[in-house]
Amino acid sequence: MQDFFEILRHRHSIHRFQQDWPVEREKLMAVLEAACAAPSAGDLQSYRIVVVEEAALIQRLQEASGGQEAVGTAPLALVFCTNQTRAEKTFGERGRKLFALQDATIATAYAQLAASASGLGSLWVGMFESEAVHAGLKLPHEYEPIAILCLGYPAERPQLTSRRKLKEMVLYATTDGVGSEAG
């Protein structure tokens, strides 16, 4: 098992996956278990995860994502959907609009990190037509797809991308207001 901070530093999006090397069931289960361990508002877990392994359904996801080639090369995809009704019952409008979305995205992030820890590559896809994913997977009406996480073994070694410096990203709050320098 890799060190957690090493996983964070070295995780990068994969745009080409090995075609002849499927994701082992135990690795898939570990990724799904990690996603379900993610924190959620009121512990409601107001999301669903749809496992997509059939080539024809992967093709539908690729079409729904504007033909993104990377989606079509993935042997497996997880579609994270909000369950807004579940969150709304407990938290009202804020639960429906925000908490269900947060729950699903946190679960997606946990799944992505678990995939990296398992030696898998991943690609978080947010650019897709929701209606096409909904129809292509025949999702129940209360589920809204918000992220496609493509998984598989990398067929490429991605270039490391630069990240903005902490001083460009972090602000410190003080009684005088928010500033860029530590109190």
Image (cartoon, rainbow, N blue to C red):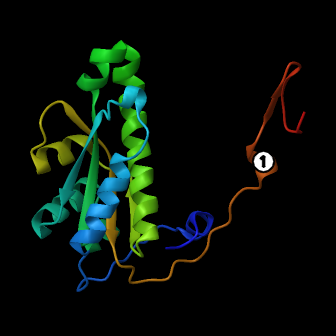
Q: Secondary structure at mark 1?
A: helix
Q: Residue furthest front?
A: 1
Q: Please give the name of the residue rendered at 12% of the width and 50% of the height, measured from the top-left corner.
A: 136
Image location of residue 34, percent across then percent down: 37, 54
Q: Could you say which quadrant of the image residue 26 lies in? A: bottom left
At x 38% / y 23%, what residue is drawn?
97
Q: Is residue 87 left or right of residue 51?
A: right
> Which residue type carries mark 1?
Glu
Residue at image x 37%, y 77%? Answer: 16
Q: Is residue 127 visible from the viewing direction of this image? A: no
Quarter of the image for residue 156 reads: bottom left
Above or below, comparing residue 173 to residue 168 in the picture:
above
Who is closer to the viewer here, 51 or 158? Answer: 51
Query: Looking at this view, is 117 or 19 the one in front?
Result: 117
**Where's residue 111, x and y in %?**
38, 56
Q: Residue at x 36, y 51 (%)?
A: 35
Q: Can you give x and y, in whole percent of width and height, for residue 157 in the image?
A: 50, 82
Q: Looking at the image, which is closer to me, 119 or 140?
A: 119
Q: Answer left or right for 139 relative to 74.
A: left
**Residue 166 at x, y = what percent?**
77, 51
Quadrant of the frame with the C terminus: top right
- The answer to which quarter of the image holds residue 68 is bottom left
Q: Where is 64 relative to 114, above or below?
A: above
Total tally of numbered discs in the picture: 1
Q: On the rendered structure, is 176 left or right of 142? A: right
Label 1 crowd (10 A; few <14 / some 14-19 / many >=20)? few
Location of residue 46 with respect to 168 vertically, above or below: above
Find disc 1 in the rendering and name its residue.
Answer: 168
Can you see residue 175?
yes
